[in-house]
Image: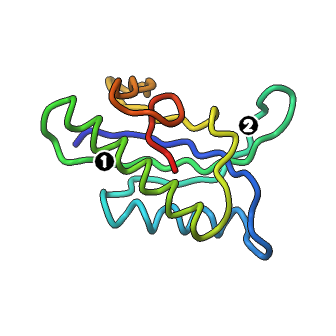
Amino acid sequence: MPSFRMHLPIGHLRQGVTPADVLREAADALSALHVVESKDVEAPLVAGRRIGRVVLRFGVEPSSTADEDAAARAALAAVVAHLEERVGTIAPASAVVLTRGHAGRFRPIPPSAAQGGVAGFELP
C-alpha cells in the first residue's frame, strides 16, 4: 500500500482548541478516506521560530502512481478544509507539505499542474 505523509502547520486556533484537538480532528477526517498509519504533533524550528504542525502518515489503495498521488492530494485538501472549519487555520500555507514514501524515504510529491492553491495543492 503506497504511504504518504502530510505536514500541516498549525496557525491560529479557535478559543479552547489545543494542538491535541487539531491532531484528533485531522486523524478523524483522514480516517474517513484512508488508513491512518501514524500521527504526531511536532514543533520544528522554521526560519528561527518554532512552528507547531500535525504530521499524519497514511496509506492509499494501490493503483497507478498518478492516481495514488491524486488521492493523496485530495485527502490533503479534505483534511485542511475540515480543520479550518472545526479548529482554526492551517498557516503558513507555504509550510504545507505532502510526501510519498519510497524505499524507506519520504520525498515531496509534485503538485498537479492543473491544481492551484499552495504549491499546487488545492486548499480552501
Residue at x 22% of width, y 43% of height: 1
Where residue 44 is drawn, which disc sits there? 2
* Furthest residue in direction bottom, as rendered: 16
Query: Which residue is painted at 64% across and 50% down in the image?
Result: 90
What amino acid is at disc 1?
Gly
User: Residue 2 lies in what quarter of the image?
Assistant: top left
Left or right side of 70 for 88:
right
Q: Is residue 58 above or below residue 100?
A: below
Q: Position of residue 92 (x, y in %)?
A: 69, 40
* Residue holding disc 1: 59
- Spot occupied by residue 83 in the image (x, y as percentages of width and height): 56, 62
User: Hey, which quadrant is residue 109 in on the image?
Assistant: top left
| Residue closest to the far right | 48
Binning the other alpha carbons within 10 Å of mark 2 as few (below 14), some (14 to 19) or many (20 upward) gives few
Disc 2 and disc 1: Cα gap in Å? 24 Å
- Residue found farthest to the left: 63
